[in-house]
Image (cartoon, grey):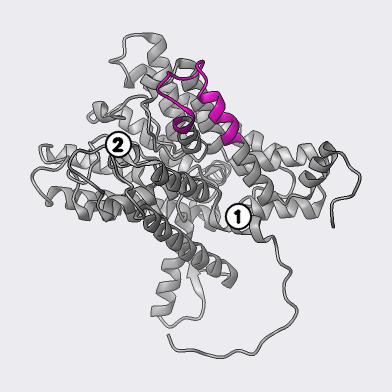
Amino acid sequence: MNSPAGLNPYALLQHWRHRLTVPQFTIVTGLLVIVVGTFVLASPLCSSDDVGLWQALFTVTSAITVTGLSIIVVDQDLTLFGQMVLAGLIVVGGLGLMVITTFLQGFVQGRSGLRRRLDKGRSLDEFGVGGMGPTFNRILFTATCVMGLGTVVLYAFGFTDIENPGRRLWASMFHVISAYNNAGFGLWAKNLEAYRDNGVVSGVIASMIVIGGIGWRVTSDLAANRFRRRRLTLHTRLVLRTTALLIVVGTLGLLVTEHFGFDSGSMAAYSLWQKFQVSLFQSITTRTAGFNTIPMSAAAITDAGLLLMIVLMFIGASPGGTGGGIKTTTFAILMGATRSTLQGRQDVLLHRRQIPDGTVLRAVGVTLASILFVVLMALLLGIGPTAGGLPGRQAYSFIEKLFTCVSAFGTVGLDLGVTANLNRWGQLVLMVGMFVGRVGILLLLSAFYGSRPTPRVGYPREDIYV
């Protein structure tokens, strides 16, 4: 249907807006929020003179995509109001940019039939057929309660070295917001390195990361069934099992790689218990959040440790959570498909349940598309001089670039000191990667190509050798 002739520009804009699909509306709204947030954060009310439009654009993109990669120091370059704006942007991105935009679309357009609501449910991670309003309210209420409890604990027992009550309260609130939304933004230049041995800070931050990362659907299912395993849905059991497995594997892996790697690494001088604490925290934060309690650099972490972190970042959080990556359920389905292939089975079984072929194909498609996109990011970072500002060094190593690309695409935010020293081209590549990683490959493709009708023509089957 073409645009009707004779309409004024405002009417044409309204007509164009109503024709947008849910994925297209999500992409456009996200970009508009980033543009508006950039001008607000670059204003003198929010930042110092050192923060220009480019620095503000990168920071706002990182906040909306809950990544945490930064080219500024939050407590030095942003005013208190600017820090509040940044925290608000993190909440908008973390509680689900897609959920919020769909809710707004239904409100603005004023019509939401069953077909449209079903379309919203599919496009936005199946958040419900009955409308987004009640679901959004429950998500917001749950998040507020969890973050409020975390803030109280951090204020009373965590950041006790901050004497000023107002500063301590804001530090507690900001870091809880950043952790629950898996953003990884810290107020200070060295993130949480000063609290490496503070069990309360590490415990609260790690708990917020896990709760936010597993998603509201899982926490709601746990609360509704009072943690009774037999009554939990397959999705909940799969998320919890995969999350626990990745935390254990990541902790033991980092403990081994950094303990036996070399004597000059970040954890070389720590006791075994300190190494275990650091490894556990980094295993949790590496998959989704991006906080760090040890110095992060290629010189301080072994190549084996960096490779393990890359894998954890690529897998990421869970569907409906505040993190990125290909998701834990996608990884579990791929492992189930691999096991079925090795056992000679025709069906993929998980927890004695058969997984539909369409779901398996989506998992394969998401993973392959994500790998290709990360490879493309790494290739683009290799075009021209993408590193600067380091005396005697012309370019970063491939593993440093790959680590940064996966950190951006997985919306993690861990940095090896690369991001701030990249030129504008390199930082633009990371911004695009952060946005694509947050909205998701499938949503992005559906925004460009739209939903295609199921073909009614069948084709003959033929085997090929693999």
Of 152 and 14, which appears nearest the observer?
14
Amino acid carrying mark 2 in the image: Asn
Q: Tell me the residue that label 1 is attached to.
A: 443
Please report the bounds of the magenta region as a residue range: 33-55
**Residue with the most extreme right position:** 6
Q: Which mark is residue 292?
A: 2
In the visual, does 100 lie left or right of 369?
Answer: right
- Percent across and percent down for residue 101 are 66, 40
Is 394 on the left-hand or right-hand side of 336?
left
Name the residue furthest left.
Answer: 263
Q: Secondary structure at mark 1?
A: helix
- Outermost residue on the top side: it is 164
Residue 262 image point, x, y percent: 10, 49
Which residue is depicted at the point 72% across and 72% down?
Answer: 454
Q: Residue at x 56, y 35 (%)?
A: 34
Where does residue 424 sit, x and y in percent of width and height? Answer: 41, 41
Q: In front here: 356 or 295?
A: 295
> First in sequence: mark 1 or mark 2?
2
